[in-house]
Amino acid sequence: MHGMKEIIEEAECLPVEERVMVIDSLLRTINPPLAEVEIEWIKVANRRLAEMRSGRVEAVPGGEVFDRIRSRFEK
């Protein structure tokens, strides 16, 4: 059986997407999401994806979003 140090070292070698999945899985064991809340988030995500695919909304690059946020608070 692996110890905590070995598990962390192995996890650090994973691609970013897989590390995020590991983190999410661990967090869910500490604070499990409420089923009804999870269902609503899935509905929102599916609606937003459909809007993106249909062209009704346009994606804004993350860097631009953060630049806008910073500019609001740099006053």
Image (tube, rainbow, N blue to C red):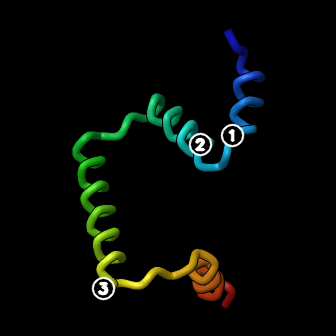
Asked whether residue 37 appears in the rendered view, the answer is yes
Q: How crowded is mark 2: few (under 14 residues within 10 Å), some or many (20 or more)?
A: few
| Mark nearer the N terminus (3 vs 1) | 1
Considering only vertical position in the picture, is 53 above or below 20?
Answer: below
The residue at which mark 3 appears reads as 56
The tag on residue 60 is none
In the rendered image, the vertical position of residue 29 relative to residue 71, given as above or below: above
Tell me if 24 is positioned left or right of 11 in this view. left
Residue assigned mark 1: 14
Q: What element carries label 3?
A: loop
Q: For the residue labelled by badge 1, is the local secondary structure a helix, a strand or a loop? A: loop
Pick the front one: 7 or 18: 18
Is residue 17 found left or right of 15 in the rendered image? left
Looking at the image, tell me whether mark 2 or mark 3 is earlier in sequence order. Answer: 2
What residue would you read off at disc 2?
A: 18
Separation (CA) of disc 2 from disc 3: 31 Å
Label 2 amino acid?
Answer: Glu
Identified by mark 3, the residue type is Arg
CB atoms of marks 1 and 2 within 8 Å: yes
Q: What residue type is labelled 1?
A: Leu
The quarter of the picture where residue 56 lies is bottom left
Mark 1 is surrounded, within 10 Å at the Cα level, by few (under 14), some (14 to 19) or many (20 or more) other residues, namely: few
Report x, y in % for residue 20: 58, 45
